[in-house]
């Protein structure tokens, strides 16, 4: 299965086009984010490889001449492109790339929370511009009706995300909206 999703930032000219493919029992996402605010004018691209349960196996993010390339094994051990273990990311089940609402879909799909349920998670957060990588704590709560409360526990930020029946973000208030 191949699916193309598009988003636009609500307060800038930033746009994203993502191609999602199901292949060989896994999921592959490739995206280009254009018009990133505060960047050097180059596009940001990312590549994600996920298992059938939406758990991250590989993440690659490129911004100009900078790149973050990580893998995660079945025990949850993260490694950089050179194979070095990244102990600070131990316990991070998901990734969150600051310039895309797509990475909010990963915990929504993986956790499969019933209405009223919530879960606190650790994620490998990639800040763009700059590709700064750090672990952060987040909480997702299924509010029902295709709405999830997202909380950045280390920063005090909260938003209610609207998602479609597949868990893809339709609206991220003040940040992103899905395009037809």
Image (tube, helix red, strand yellow):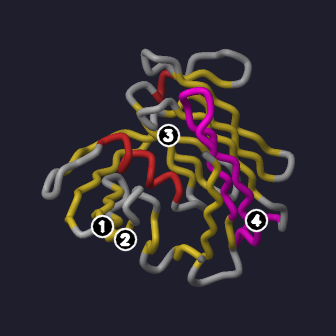
Which sits earlier in the primary sequence, circle 1 or circle 3? 3
Cα distance between the residues tagged 2 and 1: 6 Å
Circles 4 and 1 in contact, beta carbons < 8 Å: no
Circles 1 and 3 in contact, beta carbons < 8 Å: no
Which residue has dot 1 on it? 146
Which sits earlier in the primary sequence, circle 4 or circle 3? 4
Query: Where is the C terminus found, in terms of image quarters?
Result: bottom right
Quadrant of residue 92 in the image? Answer: top left
Residue drawn 30% across the image and 42% down it = 111
Residue drawn 80% across the image and 44% down it = 66
Quadrant of residue 22 in the image? Answer: top right
Please tell me whether mark 1 sits on a helix, a strand or a loop: loop
- Badge number at residue 162: 2
97 or 51: nearer the viewer? 51
Circles 2 and 1 in contact, beta carbons < 8 Å: yes
Cα distance between the residues tagged 1 and 3: 25 Å
Cα distance between the residues tagged 2 and 4: 27 Å
x, y percent for residue 74:
46, 17
């Amino acid at each position: 299965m191949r699916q193309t999703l598009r988003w636009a930032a609500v307060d800038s000219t930033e746009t994203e086009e993502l191609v999602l493919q199901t292949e060989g029992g896994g999921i592959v996402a490739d995206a280009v984010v254009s018009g990133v605010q505060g960047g050097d004018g180059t596009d940001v691209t990312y590549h994600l490889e996920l298992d059938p349960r939406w758990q991250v196996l590989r993440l690659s993010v490129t911004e100009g001449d900078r790149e973050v390339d990580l893998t995660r094994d079945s025990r949850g051990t993260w490694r950089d492109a050179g194979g070095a273990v990244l102990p600070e990311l131990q316990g991070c089940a998901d990734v969150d790339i600051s310039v895309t609402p797509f990475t909010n879909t990963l915990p929504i799909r993986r956790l499969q929370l019933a209405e009223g349920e919530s879960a606190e998670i650790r994620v490998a957060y990639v800040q763009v511009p700059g590709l700064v990588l750090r672990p952060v704590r987040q909480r997702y709560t299924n509010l029902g009706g295709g709405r999830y409360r997202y909380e950045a526990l280390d920063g005090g930020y909260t938003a209610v995300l609207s998602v479609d029946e597949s868990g893809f973000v339709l609206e991220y208030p003040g940040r992103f909206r899905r395009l037809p």
